[in-house]
Amino acid sequence: MRGRSKEDRRVVEVTLTRTGRKFYDLIQEAHVQSVSKILQALSAGEQDTLLKLFRKITANLK
């Protein structure tokens, strides 16, 4: 849904509709399940190492 800001009419605010939110939640859950399935191939130690590496990579993106 699109609407104008009450404070500044030049600003267009965009929000998901109820149907859009349901679809987003469905896709998000499928994504989480997919990632979980992928991570099952790694041991707990390997998952920890992967997480540390992702944190290091994302820290440098800021």
Image: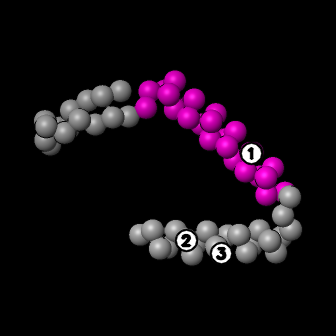
Task: Check if residue 34 falls in the magenta segment.
Answer: yes
Furthest residue toward top: 19
Over which residues does the magenta segment extend?
16-40
Q: Which amino acid does label 1 sit on?
A: Ser
Q: Quadrant of the N terminus?
A: top left
- The residue lying at 57 percent from left, 75 percent from top is 56
Alpha carbon distance from label 1 to label 2? 22 Å
Q: What percent of the width, then of the height, locates residue 13?
A: 28, 37
- Residue 8 left/right relative to 45: left
Task: Check if residue 19 falls in the magenta segment.
Answer: yes
Callouts 1 and 2 close, C-beta under 8 Å: no
Q: What percent of the width, then of the height, locates residue 37?
A: 81, 49
Alpha carbon distance from label 3 to label 1? 20 Å
First reached walking from the N terminus: tag 1 or tag 2: 1
The residue mark sitting in front, 3 or 2, is 2
First reached walking from the N terminus: tag 3 or tag 1: 1
| Residue marked by disc 1 | 34
Q: Please name whichever residue, 24 or 37, is drawn nearer the observer in this view of the structure.
A: 37
Q: Which amino acid does label 2 sit on?
A: Ile
| Residue marked by disc 3 | 52
